[in-house]
Image (spheres, grey):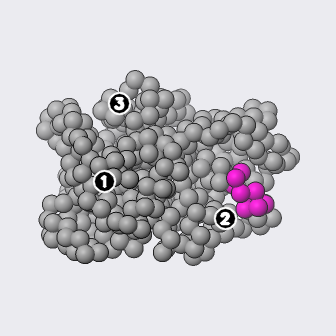
């Protein structure tokens, strides 16, 4: 593959909608050019970092490699559209995953306690009830469904709505916004919307939530954010809505992608599914492997604050770096048999939740909800087979399957 073709493929949403194409591309980069200067037409240049070890090296040095101002792949044309829509601001939202210290630490502290194991354990019974209800609804469909659209998108959304304290009647509206927000370049997911429209729809939805919680605070995460202060002052409207958008969108789409992609991996590897049925205590390990396998977050950017040498390449101050997480999670030097799905893989040092100070805030919650669901599914649903071809979302940022047609039987 010529450099120009390679560089366009890295930014092309379609690459990520065809898994073989994605894995061939990044396997080649890991082998031939793991620190690759990428100069696609219509995009500002950046370095593509494809090795597990290198991504950890960069993530560890959060003062040398910062989040702002470039956060993800956007064309120059789209960057200009964002500035125009946001009165000169370079991003549509500014959540903690866009911030650097000391600001990052202050904003993370607002919700940090909510995502700690002690708090999440308080919610385990409610999360277990949602998992049971989701499998109930699946079984009520008879013996066939589209697992992604009928089950996987709804369950994590219900968990997010539970912790934010959002009533059930808003579920469909939130789901439609999330699909458009993470639709990437996929016409099926966007449905005439675009990222700017979807972001504004999110912001407007959560503006109403924030206003209501300021007047009537409750024991939920929405109230914590609505009434939050940093340095003794209430946080601004932009930061408030950004916080909601980040929690609702990232916490939802990543879990949906992991559950559906994880189930597909079990269907394609029946011995691994049998292993879990025979020993449900292995499910927590299997969930870690599903995160590695699916890698729902495709990339984040970092920007170098000083000149740095990596594998003999000189990264200059101000250069942007794309951290390719699916590539790191298939790195032959970091994992034995990286292209095999091993349900009880251990150790499993995947970077599916990121690494360092910017590791996913809701990581423990995500694991608890996915473990609860897989326990319900594997104890109550018997054989599970494909009835058609699965399809993946064409997005270079966050996503996974968009269709998973299955046939299944009831165990009891």
Q: Along the polypeptide, which appears first: circle 3 or circle 1?
A: 1
Between 128 and 408, the one nearer to me in the picture: 408
- The Cα atoms of the two marked residues, 2 and 1, are separated by 36 Å
Residue 34 place in picture, x, y as percent: 35, 66
Residue 32 place in picture, x, y as percent: 38, 66
Instruction: Tell me what residue is drawn at x 43 percent, y 61 percent.
Output: 28
Between 346 and 100, the one nearer to me in the picture: 346
Q: Secondary structure at mark 2?
A: loop
The residue identified by callout 3 is 194
The residue identified by callout 1 is 3
Residue 91 in magenta? no
Residue 363 place in picture, x, y as percent: 48, 60
Which region shows up in magenta? 266-274
Using the image, tell me which numbered label, if any, was put on residue 343. 2
Q: Secondary structure at mark 1?
A: helix
Labels 2 and 1 touching (C-beta < 8 A) = no
Q: Residues within 10 Å of mark 3 (few under 14, many from 20)?
A: some
Location of residue 43 by image quarter:
top left
Residue 273 in magenta? yes
Instruction: Tell me what residue is drawn at x 54 percent, y 54 percent.
Output: 294
| 109 horizontally vs 150: left or right | left
Q: Secondary structure at mark 3?
A: loop
| 111 horizontally vs 339: left or right | left
Q: Is residue 300 visible?
A: yes
């Amino acid at each position: 593959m010529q450099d120009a073709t390679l560089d366009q493929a890295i930014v092309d949403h379609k690459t990520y909608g065809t898994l073989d194409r994605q894995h061939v591309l990044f396997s080649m980069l890991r082998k031939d050019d793991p620190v690759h200067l990428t100069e696609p037409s219509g995009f500002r240049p950046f370095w593509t970092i494809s090795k597990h070890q290198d991504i950890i090296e960069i993530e560890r040095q959060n003062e040398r490699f910062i989040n702002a101002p470039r956060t993800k792949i956007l064309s120059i044309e789209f960057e200009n559209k964002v500035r125009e829509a946001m009165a000169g601001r370079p991003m549509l939202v500014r959540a903690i995953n866009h911030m650097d210290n000391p600001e990052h630490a202050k904003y993370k502290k607002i919700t940090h306690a909510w995502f700690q194991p002690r708090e999440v354990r308080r919610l385990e019974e409610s999360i277990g009830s949602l998992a049971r209800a989701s499998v109930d609804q699946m079984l009520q469909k008879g013996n066939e469904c589209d697992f992604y659209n009928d089950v996987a998108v709804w369950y994590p959304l219900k968990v997010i709505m539970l912790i934010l304290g959002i009533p059930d009647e808003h579920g469909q509206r939130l789901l439609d916004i999330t699909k458009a927000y993470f639709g990437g370049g996929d016409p099926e997911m966007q449905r005439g919307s675009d990222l700017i429209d979807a972001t504004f729809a999110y912001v407007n939805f959560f503006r109403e939530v924030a206003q209501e919680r300021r007047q009537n605070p409750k024991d939920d995460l929405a109230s914590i954010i609505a009434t939050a202060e940093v340095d003794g002052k209430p946080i601004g409207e932009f930061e408030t809505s950004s916080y909601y958008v980040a929690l609702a969108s990232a916490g939802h789409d990543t879990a949906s992608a992991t559950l559906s992609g994880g189930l597909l991996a079990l269907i394609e590897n029946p011995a691994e599914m049998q292993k879990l049925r025979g020993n449900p205590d292995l499910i927590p390990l299997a969930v870690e492997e599903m995160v590695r396998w699916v890698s729902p977050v495709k990339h984040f950017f970092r920007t170098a604050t000083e000149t740095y040498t990596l594998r003999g390449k000189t990264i200059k101050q101000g250069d942007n770096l794309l951290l390719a997480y699916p590539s790191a999670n298939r790195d032959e030097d970091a994992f034995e048999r990286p292209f095999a799905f091993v349900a009880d893989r251990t150790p499993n040092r995947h970077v599916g939740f990121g690494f360092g100070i910017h590791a996913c805030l809701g990581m423990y919650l995500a694991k608890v909800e996915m473990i609860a669901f897989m326990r319900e599914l594997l104890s109550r649903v018997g054989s599970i087979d494909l009835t058609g071809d699965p399809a993946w979302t064409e997005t270079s940022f966050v996503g996974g399957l968009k269709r998973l047609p299955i046939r299944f039987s009831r165990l009891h």
